[in-house]
């Protein structure tokens, strides 16, 4: 059979049996679509799926070929992703903190605390030895030695993300009798060397306005994503500073967060009705073009969800941007043809990176951006439980989830108890599930193509024509993005915590 046909045949089987982690018998091969959905989304099935992925994600932490506490982006050598990227590592370890908060099993708690402390030690080694761009170094060797080859540097989202992971860890420790680790190690006022948290925040605070490379490591300029995670790190940093009585820290971090909040408003494009991911800037005097549509905006929204978020998750500007991105990817990727509702999502329209090299038209949907859209839908479903006003900016996004189950009109107010609100929340959840189903299908297609000896894992990309995995295999960020989405799904019916 031609590969494409074989894939299509495999897809039909896959659709009926897939789960991202085959942690139980796929018992619903012949079930009806709604029974299928129910079987897949039963809380226990989702929980075991999440735990399976979480364990797989942990394979990247302290890998056998690296120093303890290092987090490899992927074990892949072709492309070579055997490095500790500050961004990827922080996002992985942030999921470990989230697990720590949710899981009361004492043994697993001890293990997760030990993993995080190893991460702290490893990242401190990295910080001390830095490299050409100081704390803005994008990645290091897995030994902790600086990577000195050419690369897009600095990347100033890294220190902010690492600070966020440490801040959330510190918050947990303070609530669980480990105050001394926070006060003696994570956040000290030692001015000369600093400490893991203060060093990162004191890197970010005075240079929030500087151009840096974006999370995709391609453009040196001013990025919504970088600014958003910096904002949240500084807000949570100021809060910890205040708890520890560091009033000078409170002032430094609050002031910079305030400036960032103002700067973030410049990303709104009122003509196109979307948030611009990157504003024009310059790299060594050469002008850098900005970029409007980019999933980085959605990553920013979900990763900063909660306290310190510069944009509410239901902000119409976020929702209209998500809608515009989805329509662009619907048109761009052949795998999305014929798909109604959820589609496979890439980094940005016109991406050239194949996962191995870059060439015009080379880009594909990515696992982590597709999972991000699932997470966005789950979060919105949760947040609107208290009601919502339909506006010109959020209508497209909401109607696309609601489908033929109803008509939303500008100016409508949906209140708790309204049948339409309940329907909308459940359709948002279903649509969220359908993004994850695209990832589940991809894994099933791959399994069918490679045979039972294939060790299941999520790669970086999904080939836009064949629907098979592509790029770095077993990418930690792919795992952590689905873990994060599944956690968000489990929280849909718990009331949001207000800051
Ligand atoms: C490798 C980077 O990691 C990737 O994000 C980028 O698209 C390519 N290089 C091309 O610059
Ligand atoms: C390329 C991605 O663009 C970047 O965001 C990521 O940090 C590295 N790969 C490592 O996964």
Image (spheres, rainbow, N blue to C red):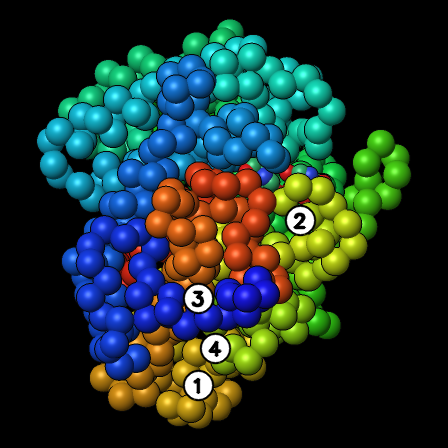
Disc 2 and disc 1 in contact, CB within 8 angstroms: no
Mark-to-mark CA distance, 3 and 2: 23 Å
Disc 4 and disc 1 in contact, CB within 8 angstroms: yes
Could you tell me which secondary element the residue under label 2 belongs to? loop
The answer, for residue 443, to whether it is visible in the render is no
Could you tell me which secondary element the residue under label 3 belongs to? helix
Q: Which residue matches tag 3?
A: 10
Between 83 and 294, the residue placed more toward the observer is 83
Left or right side of 402 for 252 = right
Q: Which residue matches tag 4?
A: 341
Q: Which residue matches tag 2?
A: 354
Mark-to-mark CA distance, 3 and 4: 22 Å
Checking the image for residue 144, the label placed there is none
Mark-to-mark CA distance, 4 and 2: 25 Å
Please tell me in which quadrant of the rendered image residue 207 appears. Answer: top right
Disc 3 and disc 2 in contact, CB within 8 angstroms: no
Residue that extends furthest to the front in the rendered view of this protein:
1
Quadrant position of ligand 1: top right
Mark-to-mark CA distance, 2 and 1: 33 Å
């Amino acid at each position: 059979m031609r590969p494409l046909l074989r894939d299509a045949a495999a897809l039909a089987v896959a659709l009926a049996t897939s789960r991202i982690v085959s942690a139980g018998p796929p018992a619903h091969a012949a079930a009806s679509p709604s029974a299928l959905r129910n079987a897949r989304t039963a809380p226990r099935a989702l929980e075991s799926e999440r735990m399976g992925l979480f364990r797989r994600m942990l394979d990247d932490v302290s890998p056998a070929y690296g120093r303890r506490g290092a987090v490899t982006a992927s074990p892949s050598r072709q492309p070579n992703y055997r490095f500790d990227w500050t961004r990827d590592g922080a996002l992985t370890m942030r999921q470990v903190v989230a697990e720590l908060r949710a899981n009361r099993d004492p043994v697993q708690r001890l293990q997760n605390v030990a993993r995080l402390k190893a991460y702290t030690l490893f990242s401190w080694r990295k910080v001390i030895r830095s490299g050409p761009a100081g704390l803005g170094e994008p990645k290091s060797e897995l030994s902790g030695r600086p990577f000195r080859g050419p690369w897009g540097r600095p990347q100033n989202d890294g220190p902010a993300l690492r600070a966020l992971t440490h801040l959330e860890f510190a918050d947990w420790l303070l609530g669980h009798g480990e105050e001394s680790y926070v006060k003696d190690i994570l956040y000290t006022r030692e001015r000369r060397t600093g400490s893991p948290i203060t060093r990162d925040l004191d890197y970010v605070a005075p240079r929030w306005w500087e151009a840096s490379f974006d999370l995709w490591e391609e453009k040196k300029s001013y990025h919504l994503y970088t600014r958003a995670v910096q904002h949240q790190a500084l807000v949570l940093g100021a809060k910890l500073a205040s708890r520890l009585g560091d009033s000078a820290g409170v002032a430094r971090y609050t002031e910079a967060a305030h400036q960032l909040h103002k700067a973030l408003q410049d990303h709104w494009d009122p003509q196109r009705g979307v948030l611009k991911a990157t504003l024009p800037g310059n790299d060594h005097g050469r002008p850098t073009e900005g970029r409007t549509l980019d999933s980085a905006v959605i990553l920013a929204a979900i990763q900063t969800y909660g306290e310190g978020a510069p944009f509410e998750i239901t902000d119409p500007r976020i929702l209209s941007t998500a809608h515009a991105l989805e329509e662009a990817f619907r048109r761009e990727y052949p795998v999305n043809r014929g798909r109604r509702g959820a589609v496979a999502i890439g980094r940005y329209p016109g991406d050239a990176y194949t996962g191995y090299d870059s060439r015009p038209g080379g880009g594909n949907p990515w696992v982590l951006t597709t999972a991000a859209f699932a997470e966005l839908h789950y979060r919105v479903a949760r947040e609107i439980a208290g009601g919502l006003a339909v506006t010109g900016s959020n209508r497209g996004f909401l109607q696309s989830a609601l489908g033929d189950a109803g008509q939303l009109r500008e100016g409508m107010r949906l209140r708790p108890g309204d049948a339409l609100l309940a329907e909308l929340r459940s359709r948002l959840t279903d649509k969220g599930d359908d993004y994850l189903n695209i990832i589940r299908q991809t894994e099933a297609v791959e399994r069918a193509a490679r045979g039972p000896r294939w060790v299941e894992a999520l790669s970086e990309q999904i080939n836009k024509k064949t629907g098979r995995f592509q790029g770095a295999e077993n990418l930690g960020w792919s795992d952590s993005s689905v873990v994060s989405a599944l956690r968000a799904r489990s929280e849909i019916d718990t009331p949001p915590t207000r800051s």
